[in-house]
Image (tube, coloured by chain):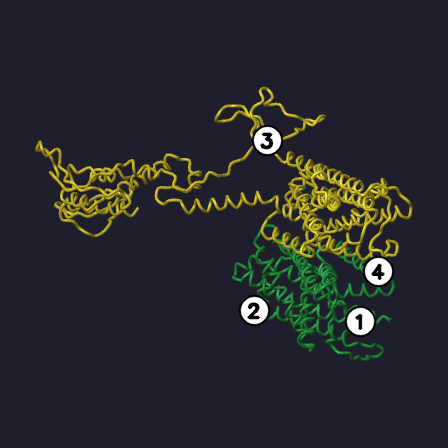
Amino acid sequence: MDIAFVIINAITVAAIYGLIAIAVSITWSSLGLVNLAYGFIFSFAGYAAWLVSTEISKDPFLIAGAGILAGAVGGIIICLLVFIPLHDKPAFTSRGMIATLAISLIGSQLFLMIFGPNSKSLPDIFGRWKLKFFDITLTADKIGIVVCSVAMLIGAVTWMRSSRRGLEIRAMMMNPHAASIVGIGIRRTGLYVMALTGAMAGLASVLLSQTYYIAPFSGLTPLIKGVSIALCGGLGSVQGAVIAAILLGLVEALTNKFLGGQFVLMTQFLIIILVLMVRPRGISGLVDKAREQ
Amino acid sequence: MSDLAPSKPYIWKNPLSVWGTASGNSEAPSTRVPDPRDTWRKNTTFKVPTHPVGRLKYFLVWPHHGNRTWNRMRWWPTRRNLLNVKGLYNRKTAIPEKKILDRRPIYWVLSFFLLLIGPLLFPQSQMNALLTAGAAFGIFAAINVCWTLIIGTASIFSLATYAVVGTAAFVTSLLSIRAGVPWYALPPIGAGIGLGFGVLIAAPALRLDGFYYALLTLGLNELFRVFFTTSKQFGAASGGLYGADSFIDQKWPPLTQSMVAYYASLCLLIASLFLFRFINGKRLGRVLRMAPEKHEAFAAACGVDFKRARITIFLLTSVALGFIGGFYAAQYRGVGYSIFDFQTVLLGLAMITIGGIGRAEGAVFGTLIVIFLRDVLLELGPWRYLIIGAAMLGVVLFLNNGFFGIRRQFNAWRAKKRGEWRSTRTEKGGETLPEEATESNDKDALYFRRFDKVQRDYLKGLITPEAIEEHRRQPLGQHSEGLERILLYFRRAKLDDKYALHRAGPQGPYKIIAFSGVRGVSPRLVDDREYGTLDDAYHAVFMRRVHDLLES
């Protein structure tokens, strides 16, 4: 239990929760939707990957692909059920948030009915090899998790920077009204955004189930961690989310080492509250109103 | 026009021709003139299909009570009315009568009466289950009334309500078990804990707004769940902390215990409703009604210290929630971890959403529905939660503000539809749009346009080939009735753009011109056609006017 091990753990956890944080962040800043149904998407993708691994094949690419695809489908479901009917109604933000919470309530009960309360686990998709690096032993799942989530993040950010669709999403982030005036379809862009962020949550689900299990309510902890990171980093900012993920991962690892596991959430929220008291819009969120509905 | 009754042809004889003084035709084929009143009636009847149901303000009207028509009952030491009653003379019958303007107090009293005699109405077989559910209903409704005060009145989107209740319940249970604190001390101690908790989580509320705070409190809720379930003092193994002192004596028969729990939680609900009334209906609530979301800057400019008001409400409500937590511990002899579950928060949110956020009746009604589904319809199994979730989703998707917002939403929708329908049936030509009619001060002009339209409709029916032929033969002099009516209308036209004839040479030819209607501006030439004789030119002008009339 040396400091390197702690830091590696912190980075691994931060990589997974960072994905969800960035998903929450992008959804909020481009669509104005506080999506608290990522827990549902998380379990949805996890169960889809589990079904593929038990029914079809144990090919790691197939399992990960199934998880990502199911996550995207889950995102599109949320978009069709919540964003498209509600986005032009009064009090959209609070109603959207409550609707996503309702979906997560329905979803978790459905999973409970269909798959039962027992948790499922995925096979190791990265194998069981190890890498010695000076004194540090890096296991396959840790390297895989970090590489996959960084690759997903870089891919998503590149796509958003260089493609036409990404340009539309960034325009929506700046000013949704003006974006719709210049011919960017709000609903269509909503579908892209939700599919992209859902895919991120799906990948996070597959990666996290390398260490944890898939259960009807297992999406809650990643959701809350992701939301806290997004909150701390500033909703709508990718680099803020990355910084916050590393910061909170470090706090978690250090608390684990020096204080004990039950104080992790407490120190994390202390840090988050301190950050938010100094910068109410998060580490790199805009100080003024970030997004006017 | 085609929709008028077909005119019957006949031979018109010039009545002046008998004396030989007649100018014009001595006789001409013509048509019978229809009754102008038919056109008038057709134009002035209300053609929209109407139904006996409209937007009637439906008031309970009492007959007058002699001299007591203008008397009101008042809450004793105050001047406050028992009911918002208005005594007045009926404007049509001139009979004095009384109207209840706000009937909600009556409904509240009736529903409380029903809750009060509830145990008499419950079927004997389900008595125990229903009493237990009723007790849960009372406590949850009290919590939700406080919560709706935070979300609705103070517009602080806090999801940590159940965390406050749970913390107060856990700490008071622990005190009761460890230190032997009696049951009557638990709610006040809980209130103190609630206050401390409120101060703690109100600090971020000062800086954060809206959804940042919601997300933060969601995390705080989870933090407390993890803290209490993993700490050793709070009995991590048994799924909760039980064994606190209670006002329900375990030596009583079970039915009495349930009854006492039922009525105690009912009292708690009434107390929380009074709290709602005294915060939302008085100064604090009114101050905040001036500062709704996104208009805070305006309210602040008017001198409303909305932050202070919000935090005051938040703290008062936290005290109440802590009190409820202590009460919870005293009623159930402790508390389970499930109060911190995400599921509990979701169910609570479902309760206040279904009824309508920001209204006490919404919180109570939503709680009733959700508790009934959850605790009474047990045979539905896991479907209960699916139904609750679907109801929550449906309400959020289709209703602006829950069940009790339906009325306002429906009225707004109907007003919108009414405007649409009105604009589709507005007739063109002479009719004025309602907006124009209300903005114009010259109502005479409006009436003239309506009359003019009716007249033009009538005259269109008189233009027949016979009339045109009659005019061609003899433009001047006595004419048949139909043609004469047309010509009178034409002659009476306003001077702007009225047609006239211009004689190009001493003996013709003639050209048609139109007056400008403005002094000093010369008439314009209508077209280049020339007419050899004056009668031809007269007829050309007539044809032009007929054409204009049929176009209009």
The amino acid on which the numbered mark 4 sits, given as a three-letter code, is Gln
Find disc 3 in the rendering and name its residue: B100
Q: Residue furthest front?
A: B125
Chain under numbered label 4: A
In the displayed structure, would residue A23 be above or below residue B384?
below
Task: Supply the letter of whichever chain is green.
Answer: A
Q: Please say if the residues under marks 3 and 4 sit with CB atoms less than 8 Å apart.
A: no
The label nearer to you, 3 versus 4, is 3
The residue depicted at 65 percent of the width and 65 percent of the height is: A198
Q: Chain B is drawn in which colour?
A: yellow
Find disc 4 in the rendering and name its residue: A262
The amino acid on which the numbered mark 2 sits, given as a three-letter code, is Arg
Q: Residue B121 appears at what percent x and percent y?
A: 69, 39
Between marks 3 and 2, how big is the CA–CA gap? 62 Å
The label nearer to you, 4 versus 2, is 4
In the displayed structure, would residue A142 be above or below residue B31?
below
Between marks 4 and 2, how big is the CA–CA gap? 46 Å
Which one is nearer the viewer's eye here, B53 or B48? B53
Find disc 2 in the rendering and name its residue: A164
Between marks 3 and 4, how big is the CA–CA gap? 59 Å
Q: Residue A212 appears at what percent x and percent y?
A: 76, 68
Q: Earlier in the sequence, mark 4 or mark 2?
A: 2
- Provide the secondary structure element on which disc 2 rests: helix
Q: Residue B157 appears at what percent x and percent y?
A: 70, 50
Find disc 1 in the rendering and name its residue: A8
The amino acid on which the numbered mark 1 sits, given as a three-letter code, is Ile
Q: Please say if the residues under marks 4 and 2 sit with CB atoms less than 8 Å apart.
A: no
The amino acid on which the numbered mark 3 sits, given as a three-letter code, is Ile
Mark identifier at residue A120: none
